[in-house]
Amino acid sequence: MTLEGKTAIVTGAGSGFGAGIARIFAREGATVMVADINQDAAQSVAAEIGGIAQAVDVANGASVAAMAGAARTAWGRIDVLVNNAGITHLPKPMEEVTEEEFDRVLAVNAKSVYLTAREIVPGMKAAGAGAILNIASTAGLSPRPRLNWYNASKGWMITATKTMAVELAPFGIRVNALCPVAGETPLLASFMGEDTPEMRAKFLSTIPLGRFSTPQDMGEAAAFLCSDAASMITGAALEVDGGRCI
């Protein structure tokens, strides 16, 4: 029970990696706010783990403020924040990505980290403790063609993680990132362009361990980094990728 007594917000927790993180956090003793743009999905996961469901658009400042306010009302404090919500554009030449697609990817994947920090960091500073985990991607470390602006947004997240870690360390706040390879999530088909046995085989051939990242993999790694067992780890971008980036 490495997160016993901790309170945690996990964004994008209605499905995929976020749901996996929320489930493992609950198993490890945390009280979890399952935050997702899909209210029904959030409620389903929250009911399963005994958590709190919260509808949120992480790209909208007022919505993020409401999420943080609901957590403070419920718990009085926020110990852990996981910025997991994310989207991608479909694989295509960089110049063919529309401005609307670009803006949405950067808003959900990058601006959201600023918005949650604006709402939650002050409370962590006052408490002199806290853990923030940003779910980046191997795309930010070893980018592939045709996902250019998604890759860039995840590279941004890794740099944001490191600079947040340096700035917030004197306040007792740790900030880390996880970098998964593609996994069995709603975004998988978007990453590959199409979900076919041939595309899966091609993608899996680039992963030395021969499988995708799973929500369970992400949950276990997230629980470690957000627990006191990782009290000396900050600014790390941990690859949970089966060797993809080697």
Image (cartoon, rainbow, N blue to C red):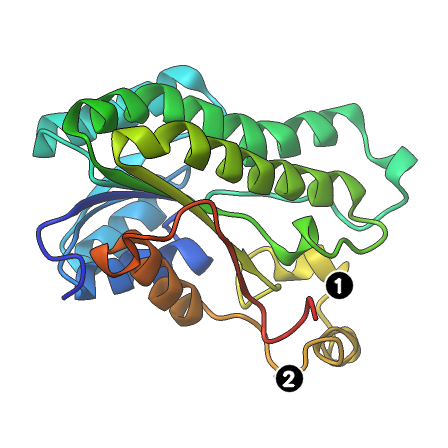
As drawn, the label of residue 210 is: 2
Q: State how many labels appear.
A: 2
Q: Amino acid at mark 1?
A: Glu
Visible residue check, residue 82: no
Residue 182 lies left or right of residue 77; in this view the side is right
Give the image location of residue 181, x and y in percent.
61, 64
Residue 108 occupies quadrant: top right
Q: Quadrant of the C terminus?
A: bottom right
Q: Earlier in the sequence, mark 2 or mark 1?
A: 1
- State the residue at coordinates (21%, 36%): 129
Q: Secondary structure at mark 1?
A: loop
Question: Judging from the image, what secondary structure is the residue with disc 2 in?
Answer: loop
The kind of residue tagged 2 is: Gly
Q: Camera-side residue: 50 or 176?
A: 176
* Mark pair 2, 1: CA separation: 19 Å
Measuring 36% from the left and 30% from the top, which residue is drawn there?
168
- Name which residue lies at 86% across and 47% down: 92
Callout 2–callout 1 Cβ contact below 8 Å: no
Mark 1 lies on residue: 194
